[in-house]
Amino acid sequence: MIESKSLNRPTINNQSCAVCGKQNLMHHFEGLIKCNNCGFIWADVSLSSEDLKNIYGKNYFFGDEYIDYLSEEAILKIGFRKIKNQLLRLFPTNKKMPDLLEIGSAYGFFLDVAKQDFNVAGVEISSDAVEYSRKKGYEIFHGELSEFDLHEKYDIAVSFATLEHLVSPDEIVKQAFSCLKPNGFFYITTIDIGSLFARFRGKKWRMIHPPTHVSYFSSSTLQSLMKRNGFKVVECKPIWQYRSLDVLLLPKFANSLFYRLVNFLGLTRVPIPFNFGDIIGLLVQKPI
């Protein structure tokens, strides 16, 4: 992974807020910029296409951001199934399966749980993840959403833990709006820097780690971004996450007697539900 110190840093005077478009900016925590107008916060870095390829290569899923992404499949799908069932209720009278696009589809775990109820497709920039998902038979667009002509093709778009990785999140929101049919839905999850837990942790909040996390929304700024780009907000609330003890313990306790004991007892793969209130799920709708 490239380190944040190796990235280009644009001057604060040359930047505009992705949420409100203003240039009334100030420095926030070290390496972060805050808009004085709307409160949106982002990392003071500039990422090229080559940087993105380096960051989100195979190592991102196996050693950098995740220990072993594929080993988390069963546990991650617990949360995905709950979300899929909630989204399915948006289409109670449909005679045909709704068309769904996942923006940032990774290794296709959500597509796996959604394919029985939706016609699924994905967009992904990781070559390894694209190859893996295509082998399962999914239609995966390799690259960024802006590279493909998907105008008004989908009934619903979803994006999980992706918006925080984008230098220009407003662009992906515009593109999502374009690819949806009238009355189509967009559901996303992202980190909430305005949550009580994030504010309590301050600059030590676990989600502050550019260059992988570069956009830091609050519930307020996220909804403002959606409204500014034509969406109608339906629901915005904190969501539950599911992870294994392996993920929670291994980075700090891999060589400890405690970890070896937990692993020996077979508890490291037990799904652990948690909700610190700092991950939000937002559902918006494109008007007719």
Image (cartoon, helix red, strand yellow):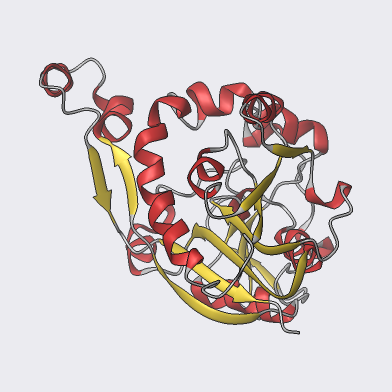
- From the viewer's perspective, is 282 left or right of 154? left
Q: Is residue 205 visible?
A: no
Identify the residue at horizontal 30%, vertical 59% (top origin).
276
Q: Residue at x 75, y 57 (%)?
A: 168
Q: Nearer the viewer, residue 205 or 241?
A: 241
* In the image, residue 210 above or below residue 27: above
Q: Is residue 14 left or right of residue 37?
A: right
**Numbered-mark total:** 0
Closer to the camera, 202 or 143?
143
- Image spot of residue 203 (x, y percent): 43, 54
> Where is 102 relative to 16, above or below?
above
Q: In the picture, which quadrant includes the C terminus?
A: bottom right
Q: Position of residue 137 (x, y in %)?
A: 66, 31
Horizontally, residue 218 falls left or right of residue 14, namely left
- Please name the residue shown 54% across and 81% down the image: 234
Instruction: Confirm whether residue 33 shows in the render.
Output: yes
Q: Quadrant of the N terminus?
A: top right
Looking at the image, which is closer to me, 68 or 11?
68
Q: Quadrant of residue 262?
A: top left
Image x and y of residue 135, in percent: 65, 24
Q: Quadrant of residue 266?
A: top left
Which is nearer the eye, 148 or 241? 148
Residue 14's x, y, as percent?
Answer: 84, 62
254 relative to 160, above or below? above
Does residue 101 lie above or below 143 as drawn?
below
Instruction: Name the residue: 32% across, 46% down.
Output: 242
